[in-house]
Image (cartoon, rainbow, N blue to C red):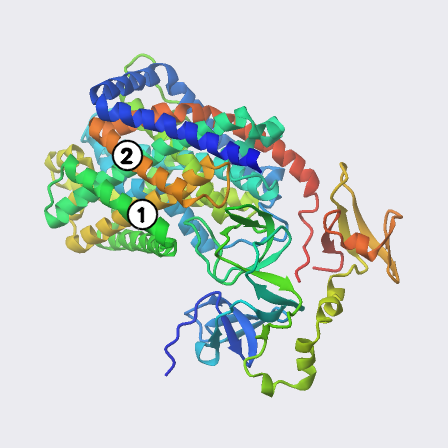
Amino acid sequence: MKLFQVRKGQFVYYNNELHRVYGVKPMYKQSVHLIRLRDLKQELTNAVSVERYKPKELDSFIFNHKVYTLRNDRKAETGDYILIHNPMPDSLDTYSLNEIEEVETADHKGIITSNSHGIKHNEYLLMVPGRADDSHPIDYQDIESVEPENLQDIESNQLVTNHISELLPTLGDIYKKKDSSESFEAMVVAIKGQTVYLGSGLVLSQEELMNTEIWEFLYNILDK
Amino acid sequence: MDNKKYTGNSVFIVSLLITLIFIVWGVFFTDNLAKVTNTIYKGSIDYLGWVYLGATLFFVVFSIYLLFSKYGDIRLGKKTDKPDFNTASWLAMLFGAGMGIGIVYWSVAEPVTHYTTPPYGKAYTIDAANTAMKYTFFHWGLDPWAIYTVIGLALAFFQYNRRLPAAISSAFHPILGDRIYGPIGKTIDILSIFATVFGIATSLGLGAMQVTAGMHDIFGVPNVLFVQLIVIAVATVLFIISINTGLEKGIQYLSNAAMILSFAIMLLLLIVGPTMTIIKVLFNTTGIYISDFIHMSLRLEPFGEGKWIASWTLFYWAWWIAWAPFVGMFIARVSKGRTVREFVIGVLVVPTLGTFLWMSIFGGSALDLVQKQGTHDLANLITKNVSLSIFTFFDYLPLSSVLSILGFAVVAIYYITVADTATFVLGMLSEGGTLNPSNKIKMTWGVIQSAVAAVLLLAGGLNVLQTASIAAALPFALIMIVMCFSLMKGFKSEVEVQRSNKRSTKHF
């Protein structure tokens, strides 16, 4: 009999793959609600079919199509991603175990994430992009039984660039210019190679439009 | 960086000094303190009552305006932000935070006290009972929640949409610009901390009295000042341990437990109490409340003494205002991802209805009980010792020991969670709105707030608690009025930014 209690936030293996528990709903038969870290796919299951894993330093895994290695060798800085592996929330804080967040500001006391959570320096592990050579891949519980084609993902560092295409501009994306004093929004009307044409007649490269400090993605006109 | 650090410290040091001066005054010149607070109390009736009445009515009108205004669609946070909590638990948390200790303390005592000494009319009559319920609804209804709506909305909006620090001064950014980091901003923060310390100390003082009363009722511990001070001391040690050992998670569980327990008591009481009377009270009083709202809101006694108004309505308004930075901070923390309209419904409308239900259940059954006695003895007994009132009331119900123990547990848990959360809020406010206040500062505030509560109890108990909060909240009431205009200015520019708020957002 398995007496382990599943809690929100834990990393678990389900069907041999790494998931994060995003919710436990005791009233349901499928009480454990998971999200697959690799591609953020949702799964519902029960406590019997998951196996807990505690992430630690130098573990590497794919999160939302990108590879990260957990590190603890420096304090987080603005723009870094962190994994809150040791949450000690104050009484008004709303974050939970193993949340992955982006750092907005950092000082000697701790960091503040883009999600307005105040986190102290001993509560998180840094998520450094890429898979370090001395890292321990934790994407699969039993790496032997994984089909070879999936395993390729694990070995290649290319994943960082391969899958970013999902975030690239597509037709119908509406972007807002952040640095201009008057409100400026435009839609992507054409894409030719690396060049993007915006509705106002503005022509710029993909990289320029991807610069989140200047352009903010609002929504796609086809989304409902 | 160094400059910013300095900013945080100066606010902390000045507000700490002011509070310390007050504590020293209270310990060594207790009589003098009681005398001075009494003078302020009298002055507040004569000169400042209208300020509180006017300001609070304005907050109600302003909140209702926001509900129907075009700003209702503004989302607090990024457009893609989703609420952290589902609506049911969000509402439960709001209710618990806003009322907490107070609602347990007053829900029996207030209607019965109004019944024995009504604001007008003859005591111990059916009319007095209706008036008593009406005023209880009034003091706990739209007005406190409107105050929380204004401050919670301002804190959430400037924190999440404008990415400003979690300090009260941030709410003045549209008016003051970067001067919020200068002396004006610091003064605002210091005044808000000063009000908050007293708001919290009032609640902790009431809480300590109630915990002691509960122990008296259940375990036979003497119900005296000395025990109340011990309660404060023990609680202080407990939450300081929790700050240092990372037991905060445990505190969150405790506060959820308190919430569930209070709902359990409410349901139990609805069943074992006079159910039909309670329902009639709820409907009847809601009706009178709505039709008499304006009259009650502006009621002063120009040709009389106005004592009743000062010790009830003005005290409550001041207490809610003093308590507002604390509750506002909490509400802002849990409301990210809600729209302004959802926020106003969740913070103003729903908790008001919840309070009506709670007050009808407790107040309605208490008044029913008191009236059925035929004599005035029970009513006078409850009025004579207000902290003990809820336990006295439970003694007359079936399952009285279960109710008493549950009630005691709720009060004790609320006390510790409020005290603990308060240290965090004061830490944030006094360190320039950082979300990571240091443990040292949190512990300092922990000791200070307990000391203020103890001093107020030493200086004369409930009356001094009431007068102190009326005095401390006044500057903050004025700050809050300006805050409304600042918030409007912020919303106006936000509407331009969020013109697209009706559009859907892309979810990865």
Using a 10 Å C-alpha cutoff, classify the residue at mark 2 as few (fewer than 14 neighbours), some (14 to 19) or many (20 or more).
many
Q: Residue at x 13, y 44 (%)?
A: B216
Disc assigned to residue B121: none
Q: Amino acid at mark 1?
A: Phe
User: Which chain does the residue under circle 1 lie in?
Assistant: B
SS under mark 2: helix
* Residue sitting nearer the eye, B474 or B60: B474
Residue B268 figure quarter: bottom left
Is B62 left or right of B385, judged from the image as shown? Answer: right
Q: Decide if residue A84 is in sight here.
A: yes
Instruction: Check the residue under mark 2 and report the chain it is in.
Output: B
The residue depicted at 28 percent of the width and 17 percent of the height is B36
Marks counted in the figure total 2
Q: Position of residue B412 (x, y in %)?
A: 25, 48
Q: Which quadrant of the rendered structure holds the C terminus of chain B?
A: bottom right
The answer to whether residue A105 is above or below residue A142 is above
Find residue B239 and name its label.
Answer: 1
- Is residue B301 at least partly visible in the picture? no
